[in-house]
Image (spheres, coloured by chain):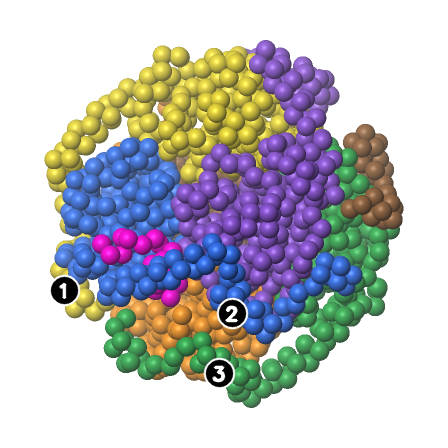
Chain colours: A purple, B yellow, C blue, D brown, E orange, F green
Amino acid sequence: MGGVIVTNPPKAEAKDVEALAGFGVATVSEAMGRTGLLGPSIRPVQQGVRVAGTAVTVLSWPGDNLMIHAAVEQCGEGDILVVTTTSPCTDGLFGELFATALQKRGVRGVVLNTGIRDTQELRDMGFAAWSRAVSSQGTVKATGGSVNVPIAIDGQVVRPGDVIVADDDGVVVVPREKARETAEKSEAREAKEAATRAAFFEGQLGLDRYGLRDTLKQLGVEYQSYEEYTGAGS
Amino acid sequence: MGGVIVTNPPKAEAKDVEALAGFGVATVSEAMGRTGLLGPSIRPVQQGVRVAGTAVTVLSWPGDNLMIHAAVEQCGEGDILVVTTTSPCTDGLFGELFATALQKRGVRGVVLNTGIRDTQELRDMGFAAWSRAVSSQGTVKATGGSVNVPIAIDGQVVRPGDVIVADDDGVVVVPREKARETAEKSEAREAKEAATRAAFFEGQLGLDRYGLRDTLKQLGVEYQSYEEYTGAGS
Amino acid sequence: MGGVIVTNPPKAEAKDVEALAGFGVATVSEAMGRTGLLGPSIRPVQQGVRVAGTAVTVLSWPGDNLMIHAAVEQCGEGDILVVTTTSPCTDGLFGELFATALQKRGVRGVVLNTGIRDTQELRDMGFAAWSRAVSSQGTVKATGGSVNVPIAIDGQVVRPGDVIVADDDGVVVVPREKARETAEKSEAREAKEAATRAAFFEGQLGLDRYGLRDTLKQLGVEYQSYEEYTGAGS
Amino acid sequence: MGGVIVTNPPKAEAKDVEALAGFGVATVSEAMGRTGLLGPSIRPVQQGVRVAGTAVTVLSWPGDNLMIHAAVEQCGEGDILVVTTTSPCTDGLFGELFATALQKRGVRGVVLNTGIRDTQELRDMGFAAWSRAVSSQGTVKATGGSVNVPIAIDGQVVRPGDVIVADDDGVVVVPREKARETAEKSEAREAKEAATRAAFFEGQLGLDRYGLRDTLKQLGVEYQSYEEYTGAGS
Amino acid sequence: MGGVIVTNPPKAEAKDVEALAGFGVATVSEAMGRTGLLGPSIRPVQQGVRVAGTAVTVLSWPGDNLMIHAAVEQCGEGDILVVTTTSPCTDGLFGELFATALQKRGVRGVVLNTGIRDTQELRDMGFAAWSRAVSSQGTVKATGGSVNVPIAIDGQVVRPGDVIVADDDGVVVVPREKARETAEKSEAREAKEAATRAAFFEGQLGLDRYGLRDTLKQLGVEYQSYEEYTGAGS
Amino acid sequence: MGGVIVTNPPKAEAKDVEALAGFGVATVSEAMGRTGLLGPSIRPVQQGVRVAGTAVTVLSWPGDNLMIHAAVEQCGEGDILVVTTTSPCTDGLFGELFATALQKRGVRGVVLNTGIRDTQELRDMGFAAWSRAVSSQGTVKATGGSVNVPIAIDGQVVRPGDVIVADDDGVVVVPREKARETAEKSEAREAKEAATRAAFFEGQLGLDRYGLRDTLKQLGVEYQSYEEYTGAGS
């Protein structure tokens, strides 16, 4: 089976990661043209926490956390560990012992396309985590895999050194080459959203702000009174 | 494809909505003969909040929130926005910009048979929301749909003006013609439950209170000691 | 259809239950050789609560809580009610009226392989609960079933008198004959984990602590620089 | 709880049903503006069979087929039985005994938003069936429900007398008032599709036939050579 | 972790297995009081095949088929291999090489609470199989487990030597001590069903045959004409 | 949002594709170290068909098949169309009109991480198809996407020109650079499996052929007679 542990992959620049840390997951994804999101089944184990960091990726065998041990050594300040398995798995591959080791190394969180355990302990120690399942199911250390190779989760590719942003809404991955550009676009989008928010607060309608009345007309959507609608036979 | 935006549908009376607001979702459903519930996959994004209001319904294309913009204009004081899609969708069709507009108009919450985003912001601003998924996935405004037509979610029909009650246990819809009757039955049921609660607290058994010992006997359910049971061969 | 209500099954000893109450679900499962876990779909309705108690088991018909009424009478101090249905069901078979009766009898919590309702009330009264779904769907009392017979949930058998331990990570069942042994092994494991935690906190790697560098080598997992890896063609 | 058995509901006209029987489910749904489909989880138990008929609807309690017995009496020549439950259920509510009774009465098939059994026998006797699950789980006859009331399955309302068309692709419901209009539109659509099929067979592209090259341009979709694309940095 | 391979467990008697082989899964389950069914997610890979045999049970680690190799040696004439994993797994733990070995030993089929591969080859060689998934995902042989210990699948316990009956409708397990009794009850049930079938074919209604008109009345289910029903306001 | 249509991507060589066409999906995946499989939810709509070809990839918006029209023009002899959506979707994005166009161009099949319709027609015309769902739900042509960019399905990346092999067991993707090597390894593996099959047919055990008796011993798996096992207390 072999597998490979890749050392010293390129990473997004720290200042771009910091810039991205200032935006929510939804904003970052929108700034990339509505792409980059891991799916809605990956949920936070805490509430109200947002992190951004550079990915250290792990590809593990189901029911086996050997490669997470190998990955810890590759993790450092500002990283986020991202773990998937070669086939679907909900076992608890990660818990507070790993978190202790990672937190000491300056790692900012973990994203698991599998299960997590010790969730209360993780909340208590302030180690941020997102996972597909919560499960106490323990694992073995018997089968190889890889660290810092590209992995795919929910239709999204995560490469080592890519930027991960995660909050209550989920997880987004920003390709490392697009980190700066995405941070800039996120800022522009946030400014635009602030203006929209103010306008909405003042009572402007999206129909008018975005010129959607024409769109509705072109699509053939009609306005009817309730009487017309029900009289029409439904 | 067209679609229709129905204006000024009839609504349940405000005083009946207020009356229903005093009961939990379970009580209201029981009062309607155990009907009216959207299914258990629609969950709140906050904890400890109960709302009641009149439905403004939206039928959207998957991945498209155009019709929610159209619906905002139809929403007013005391309404609850209820959104479904023409085929299953977990995208984040609704977020805090919409909530800002709706809150300003006196809307009490949103129920989404699809995804929601900006969940932390929604909690912060106190806008109540229930959804099938949490997802940052953004949407387009390209395909028509309808507003204020009857929609079906999880085996339940929601018509504009029907009463929605939602709390930590889920969401129930009360047909607008049955709002008053249901409020009255809910009150009766709650009184009955209070008596049962007191009796249970005093140690009375449901077996006795509901006359279930006879039921068990008629159904052929037998009491056995552990020795009889295991001696019987299992 | 019949069914049977078994009275006075043997139970794990109280002091062993108390000993197990001192450990988390993950620790207890590990101490049993990574077994005993109900699956990750059974989730707590509260956060930060751990309970341990002896199982009173219920096998109900879907949409029917008759046998839970029968089970209440069989419940006492230190028990945990464990309910499953003869086929998959998400209805709210259990709510605060049952919890009132059980809390009065000294029951420590409920585990439902089905739905629960009145979740906010349960949190308010401090009655611990784990369930597969949250649903207000009410039930009938029309079909027989059994109490205190062995039931199977998610690949795990629960017998009356077995020990249930539940926390934020899920639910584990300990066969009553193994309660003491498991408590002892849990303690040993926790001591070992404390040492590991300290070592990890000091910066030791799992690779070294568990001798995994050899494992990786034997499995053919190779270290490569990023240049070697990408030069190799991927 | 009661429930109601509605007798002699209006039905779509037989000649319109026959007309609709000539089209596939996809064509009929397109003819209604891409609506009317029960979801993809409802699958046929046979292959290569298409039926059309008028709905007799059943709302049953989970795990209970009492109301199907009541419905048989309401079924006649040209009908299709459509069954759902008050909460999700995969039990085998329907099997070959029911099929024997229904086939004798001229019923053309069954659509179950729940489980079915005796699938091989049903294939052998040529009784067409669609269901959400295949399950041998037997049922009781203990709880009331309704026959010939509107029911909702997968976001679609089915009323008694509506037309059901079902084939290998799934199941579509046509409101009885729209049966004729939908048959006509289906015919028009089929003619149009025949022309498209011929054109595609001759090599014409949908891009040209539907004028989509402009659409792509307006949406900002660009053509790039592989060299441009990869040189651009992805 | 260890695990155990149990040799020479007791088995149901061959003549009782043969007797049970004469009945469908639904009949056998009904004869046991509607119990014993593995759930509807375990599906056949072929159509029109029924088998009965004695269980050889396997508990494997996810992604690992080591214990199936150990189990082959324990399998003989008239057995059916039944495999589950310690946590949910869809990998292809079983394929035609195993089938070749088992078929040679007189094994009648396999039931997998996990994935299967080489499905076309299995159909070609006439080796009957039921599984939760079809997957080509290969496995390792690295982690221990058990053979011929009781396992639980979908709420059902399967012990070595119990009788498995499987057909197009699914899989049922008959405790070995109840094999004869269940065969007898199955025969009685089938006779009863034959009479019912004949009566239904002659046009008798289940409402009359089972005395359900009274049941409906007692439950408060009412008959209404369509005019009464719709005039009543719904 | 734009999107891009990439023209003339590199493709695996035809002779390597032909070589791979000689092996089953399981063999090809094993030859790549047990990688490359799309997950078990992607199923064939026909039985007994195996195809191999080069991927033309499509990334569509949910509920929209505009980009499939754009992709048809990019498809030619020996290709297989592979379609995914930007978020989960079960709609019928593909049917027999597309198949007519593609078959004419020499395309060998389609793999859809979404829904398909006209399944009976596809079987009749002999156009091979694999999909996540069967659904008649029609689509719009309103939102952009991409053709011939890398896409990810179920944890697997598919790039244009990669080899797709699909059969009754599912779908595997072979990176175009590894096509030849994988074909060679597949042949070696098949030879090895033929020898194993012969040995198994002769009665040799996997335990002996693969030296697994030592593995079991090292893992601490013990053999016990049934008496020892049950006497041991379980």
Q: Which mark is residue F214?
A: 3
Q: Which residue is mark 2?
A: C211
State the separation of the CA atoms marked 2 and 1: 53 Å
Q: Is residue F89 left or right of residue C115?
A: right
Q: In terms of depth relative to the viewer, which is nearer, B187 or F213?
A: F213
Disc 1, SS = helix
Q: Is residue E187 left or right of residue F27?
A: left
Relative vertical location of residue B55 with respect to residue C211 in this rendering, above or below: above
Camera-near label (1 vs 3) is: 3
- Residue D178 magenta-highlighted: no
Camera-near label (3 vs 2) is: 2
Q: Which mark is residue B228?
A: 1
Alpha-carbon neighbours of circle 2 within 10 Å: few (<14), some, or many (≥20)?
few
State the separation of the CA atoms marked 3 and 2: 21 Å
Q: Is residue D139 left or right of residue B161?
A: left
Label 2 is placed on what type of residue?
A: Gly
Magenta segment: C18-36
